[in-house]
């Protein structure tokens, strides 16, 4: 399953940190952040619960970039 989320982040480097943190989250097959469009496209692993996984993605992103936001 693939979903797109609106994000709020200040710089391209911060967006790259968010992408890396999201990709390290269990349940995420692939995450791609587009800084120019302020979007995160997430492909979930088979059988993963997108809502639960995205809560973990948000926590992991906040660890590397505290002022970022993902609108779930």
Image (cartoon, grey):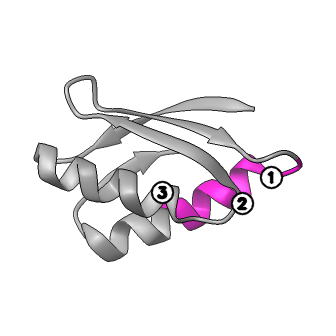
Residue that numbered label 2 is attached to: 52
Q: Is residue 44 magenta?
A: no
In magenta, the rendered stretch is: 47-57
In terms of secondary structure, where does tag 3 sit? helix
State yes or no: discs 1 and 2 in contact (Cβ < 8 Å).
yes
| Drawn side of residue 72 relative to residue 20, left or right | right
In terms of secondary structure, where does tag 2 sit? helix
What is the C-alpha distance between the residues marked 2 and 3?
Answer: 13 Å
Q: Which mark is residue 49?
A: 1
Q: Residue at x 48, y 57 (%)?
A: 22
State yes or no: discs 3 and 1 in contact (Cβ < 8 Å).
no
Q: Would you call the spot at circle 1 few (<14 residues within 10 Å), some (14-19), or many (20 or more)?
A: few
Disc 3 versus disc 1: nearer the observer: 3
In terms of secondary structure, where does tag 1 sit? loop
Q: Main secondary structure of the magenta part?
A: helix
| Drawn side of residue 68 relative to residue 4, left or right | left
């Amino acid at each position: 399953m693939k979903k797109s989320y609106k994000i709020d982040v200040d710089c391209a480097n911060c967006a790259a940190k968010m992408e890396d943190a999201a990709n390290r989250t269990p349940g995420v097959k692939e995450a791609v952040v587009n800084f120019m469009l302020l979007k995160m496209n997430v492909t979930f692993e088979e059988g993963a619960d997108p809502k639960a996984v995205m809560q973990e993605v948000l926590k992991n992103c906040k660890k590397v970039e505290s002022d970022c936001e993902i609108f779930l």
